[in-house]
Amino acid sequence: MDRTEKICDIIEGSSYVVFLGGAGVSTESGIPDFRSKNGLYHKKKKRFASYEPEYLLSSECLRKKPEVFFEYYRENLDARAVEPNDAHRALAAMEHAGRLAGIITQNIDGLHQKAGSRNVQEIHGTIWTNHCVSCGREYDSDFIFDSREEVPHCLDCGRTVRPDVTLYGELLPDEAYDRSIRMIQKADCLIIGGTSLEVGSAAQLAHMYHGRSFIIINKTKTKLEGKADIVVHDSIAKVLKSVTELMGIWQDDDT
Ligand code: NAD
Ligand code: ZN
């Protein structure tokens, strides 16, 4: 049995499959991750060279140096025109076929929903909505990305409008995290993919998993490999596409 057949076998023999993913799921759509060779952490422009990468996406930076925060945010996190790749499509196909209970993602790009996935828990929030830090008025993603102001301001109260993204130094969105915990506890198959598991929240969720089967699909080595039944070091889009093809649920674009 090759690795694709083994993964199919496990998924088809499970009743509650959960996928936990990160930035690596979206690299094949052209969005850089953080820690790979071409990741955001390694290609900082001179303008931002004096800041730690974590600082540029922190609540402290938003508070103390909002101009820097918004410049970095607009330059690096505008995923409005980005399209899902085969990894997103395969996961959506699995959910539609009743083979996947849901997705827990650290990504903030909304590409799973664009591909048609419905049960998506965004534990680090989303770039697709914004809100005023004072009155709470909600704004769409264009409000920050297309704003001519260095620091976008609320039309009602004049305070800063910020993205609904969880920044370093902030608590995770309760609801999404609680739902994720329940999904992990219920799962009998966990697939982890495209994440270094370096960010605490995702690693904690992974440690809470005590179900039967555990699959890791990631280009590079990650910490939990000793616990996994199958580890694949390859492109997540390629692997998930071949899994769904073998399951007979892959949908070509033009169908
Ligand atoms: P990370 O950069 O720490 O790790 C990404 C992992 O994915 C690496 O181990 C890498 O080897 C692997 N990878 C990259 N491309 C891959 C591919 N095509 N197939 C398989 N594996 C691949 O990312 P992380 O663990 O998600 O943590 C970074 C944090 O940054 C997260 O909290 C996330 O919110 C945020 N982030 C989000 C986006 C996004 O929304 N697309 C992009 C960058 C960072
Ligand atoms: Zn306001």
Image: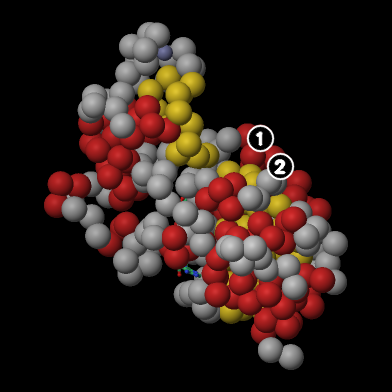
Q: Residue at x 56, y 48 (%)?
A: 114
Disc 2 vs disc 1: Cβ atoms closer than 8 Å?
Answer: yes
Q: Residue 53: percent from the left, percent from the top?
A: 30, 50
Q: Which residue is mark 2?
A: 179
Please state if 200 lies on the left or on the right of 77 as rendered: right
Q: Residue 172: percent from the left, percent from the top?
A: 55, 38
Is 47 located above or below residue 60 in the figure? Answer: below
Q: Which residue is mark 1?
A: 175
Q: Residue at x 36, y 45 (%)?
A: 77
Amino acid tagged 1: Glu
Q: Residue 234: percent from the left, percent from the top?
A: 52, 78
> Residue 222 got which mark?
none
Based on the displayed image, in which of its 4 quarters is residue 169 positioned?
A: top left
Crowding near the residue tagged with mark 1, few <14, some 14–19, many ≥20 C-alpha atoms within 10 Å: few
Based on the displayed image, in which of its 4 quarters is residue 93 positioned?
A: bottom right
Q: Nearer the viewer, residue 82 or 217?
A: 82
Amino acid tagged 2: Arg
Please state if 251 lies on the left or on the right of 48 as rendered: right
